[in-house]
Image (cartoon, rainbow, N blue to C red):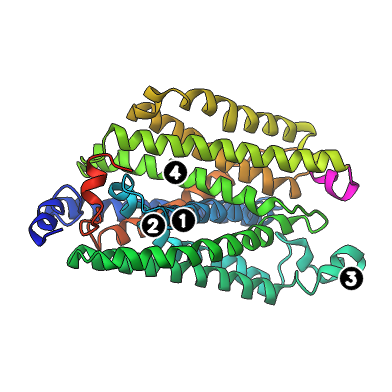
Amino acid sequence: MTSESIHELAPPQASFRDQNLSVKVFRARQLVFLVGVANLVIAIAMGLFAHDGMRQFSHSYLLATCFWSSVSLGALFFIAIQHLTRSGWSVVVRRIAEIFASSIMINAITFVPILVGLMLGQSSLYVWNDATLSASDELIRNKVPYLNAPFFVARTIGYFAVWIYLARRLWRESSQQDVSGDSELSLRMERLSAPTLLLSALTVTFAAIDWVLSLDPHWFSSIFGIYFFSGSMVAFLAALTLTVDVLQRRFGLLPMVQAKHRHDLGKLLFGFNCFWAYIAFSQYLLIWYANIPEETSWFQVRQSGGWGMISLVLVVGHFVLPFLGLMPRRMKENPQILVVWSVVLLMMHATDLYWLIFPTLNPTGPVFSVQPILSLLGVGGVYIAGWLWIAGQHPLLPVGDPRLIESLSGGH
């Protein structure tokens, strides 16, 4: 691709660098950051002054950090897959995915309070951090070599270090290609994507076990890491679809994203949501068929009382309705309808994490509280502000990618 064609594509259709637009983005970044911080302050205040409020807040904050981290992790998988398959169609939306993946740095920062709390000996979130309980419970005591605060913190730092390194490497190569248009950089990103997939699969599996599964140290599932991964892909694809629509409608950017690209995004969203349902059913079926008390107790809690209703909501809202709604081609090509389903699936992903995390706090049923919502909005405000800051550094389109012309013509 020549430097002239690069110059033609970059401004103003694919960049925040226009003077008027940069001011608008700067104000939006300030606003979402302040709103996010305000929501977190309110959630913390409720935790300090309500009965058992800090336990409620700690679970809410974990839900929020896992939610936004899953979006970034899904983006990292998406980028690696596109490079490995030499995909042409996705080039016009790949830079948005790269920004999401690079935002894993923001997720690392938001995870710090959880790690600090563990090192200070707090057990309001992870009961295995209670020395008295660990000493009296044989099963937890046997898991202490793995489930202990220093090792947990070290592992989490390691996960984020791997993710940040991989995301930044791919981002750096892609941004260099904006300037040079060198096709060799595409080959380098392709070679980097294979270990990215391998390392990401391994670290995401252990992160899901550490962050969510270990909330109930008596329970275990060999398929839980894949379950978390599938939800992450759904969340990212929904966020990507929603972001592209906002950039087009609110900022007048990325006009080259057309119905054929939305159709491809819709197919991926539909496919990975079916994959999520398949993994969820497989996990349930294996545990139900084996009927081992150590495994079934986890599902018994989530099938009883109010949690049973949440389970039904997930079956219908996370699978049945999106399955029917996203199946027709015209639904995937219609931007308004695709945005609606993206919002629905993001809400269902948050509900799924709520269903995974909160029964350890309230086993008899969900207790209404605005803290989970405030935490999601709070961490989300910080995350989106960071996303906008990263997005302002380079064009929103990989203008030096040799497959860009193929992507603009709808190639695969």
Q: Main secondary structure of the magenta part?
A: helix
Label 1 near label 3: C-beta < 8 Å?
no
The disc labelled 3 sits on which kind of residue? Ala
Look at the numbered disc 3 and give the secondary structure of its residue: helix
Residue tagged 1: 72
Residue bounds of the magenta highlight: 291-298
Q: Residues within 10 Å of mark 1 (few under 14, many from 20)?
A: many
Of the two numbered discs 2 and 3 in the rendering, the one whose residue sits closer to the viewer: 2
Look at the picture and state if 348 lies above or below 81: above
Alpha-carbon span between mark 4 and mark 3: 44 Å
Look at the numbered disc 4 and give the secondary structure of its residue: helix
Alpha-carbon span between mark 3 and mark 1: 37 Å
Q: Residues within 10 Å of mark 2 (few under 14, many from 20)?
A: many
Residue tagged 2: 83
Residue tagged 3: 135
In front of the other: 42 or 329: 329
